Image (tube, rainbow, N blue to C red):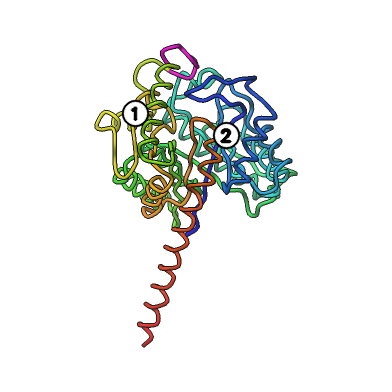
Amino acid sequence: MPVEFLGIAATHDGSETSQRSGAAFDKEYTLKLARAHEEHGWDRVLFAYGSGSPDPAPAAAFIASRLDRLQILLAHRPNVSYPTFAAKTFATLDQISEGRLTVHFITGGSDREQRREGDTLTKDQRYARTREYIEIVKRIWTTHEPFDHEGEHYQFHDFVSDVFPAQQPRPNVSFGGSSPAAYAAGGAEADIYCLWGEPLHRTAEQIEAVKAAAAAGGRTDVPRIQVAFRPIIAPTEELAWEKAHRTVDAIRARREAGAQPHRRVPGSPENTGSQRLIAIAEAGERYDRALWTPTAAATGGAGNSNALVGTPETVAQALLDYYDLGVDILSARGYHLLDDAIDFGRYVIPIVREEVAKRDAERAALGTNTLAAAGA
C-alpha cells in the first residue's frame, strides 16, 4: 500500500524548545515552511487549531493558493462554528486547493481549553456532538436538495449549500483519540484515524480497537491509520542521542521559565491519549528500535511528543516497523521546524519510500505466484 508523510504547517518558528521570533502569524515563514515540505517529498501538512492561535482555515487557503502540490490537513473543532457554516468553508477551501483538502475533526481533550471558547460539554458529550457534526458535514457536501436535521446537538431546516467540494464525492475526514468514546465515533465516521506514537505492541492494540469500532459502526471498510512522532536525527547514533538530550533539556528549561503558560494545564491531563503517553514514559525511556519517551514526559504528555531517535536509516527502519503494522500515513514534526522538515525530507522519506516500494513489489509477486500455483 502507498505510504504518505504528514508535516506541520506552523504559522511561526517557535516550538517547545525555542521562542518564536515574530508574530503568531508570520506570513512569510508560513509560506517558507510549507514550500520546504512541498520541495522535500512530503505529501501534506497539518494546519493545527488552538483556542488563541491564528485561524487555520485562511492560513490554509493562503498556502493552497501559492503552492501547487502540497495537500492540506485542516484541523477544526466543532464547538467553534455551526456545521452548515463549516461545511461551506471546507468546500470553498477544497475548491481553492483544487481538491487537496482533508478535514481533521478535534473533539477536545481538555475541559479548560474547550471552555476558553465557550464549550461546557463533558468529554463524552463532545464526542457525541463531533459524530453528529461529521455526519451533517458529509451530508451537506454530497446533498443537492434541501434537507432538515433534528439531532441532539444541532437542528436546522430546509438547508442546501451552493458550494461543493472539488473532490467527489467528498474530502476525507480525519479523527483522533484513544478513549472508548473516541474509537466509537472515529471508527464509525473517519476515513483516517490518527494516533500518537506509542510502542509497537500498543499501537497494534489501538489499530485493532479502531477496526472493532468500525465494524460495530456498521462499516465493511476500516479507516486508514496515521501515527505521529517527533524525529530527532543526526549523521551518527552518538550525535543523534546527544541532540535528543539537548532537546529535552531545552524543553524543560522553557517549561521552568513559564513559556507558553496557557498551553499547559497543571496536574494530570484529562485526555486518554496524554495519559497513555505519560504511563509509557513512566514505564521506560526506550522502546523497540528508536522510540524515546523523555520528550513526552518533559511536556506532560502534550500532544504528539514521543520521539524517534537515531540516524536517518534507524528512524526510517523504525517507521517501517509501523508501516508493517498497517500504518500508511506517517506524521513527523521536528523541534526546529524548518531545518528538520528539510532534513527529514532529504534523508528519511526516500529510504522509507524505497523500502515500501520493495515490500509492495514482493507482496504483488507473492500474490501472482499464489494465483499461478492455484491455477496449476
Q: How far from the left and from the top, in percent, is residue 273?
A: 38, 33
Q: Residue at x 40, y 26 (%)?
A: 246
- In the picture shown, does residue 366 fall above or below 178? below
Binning the other alpha carbons within 10 Å of mark 1 as few (below 14), some (14 to 19) or many (20 upward) gives many
Q: Amino acid at mark 1?
A: Pro
Residue situated in front as seen by the camera: 292 or 299: 292
Q: Amino acid at mark 2?
A: Leu
Give yes or no for residue 93 being in the magenta stretch.
Answer: no
Element under label 1?
helix
Q: How far from the left and from the top, in percent, is residue 353?
A: 49, 55
Q: How far from the left and from the top, in percent, is residue 26?
A: 67, 25
Label whose residue precedes the other's in the sequence (2 or 1): 1
Q: CA distance from mark 2 to mark 1?
A: 23 Å
Residue under label 2, please give it.
338
- In the picture shown, does residue 357 fall above or below 98? below
Binning the other alpha carbons within 10 Å of mark 2 as few (below 14), some (14 to 19) or many (20 upward) gives many
Residue situated in front as seen by the camera: 228 or 183: 228
Q: Which residues are magenta?
A: 255-264
Element under label 2?
helix
- In the picture shown, does residue 216 fall above or below 265? below
Residue under label 1, please give it.
294
For residue 195, the mark is none
Q: Residue furthest top?
A: 257
Q: How far from the left and from the top, in percent, is residue 302?
A: 42, 27
Residue situated in front as seen by the camera: 210 or 83: 210
Q: Residue at x 41, y 38 (%)?
A: 196
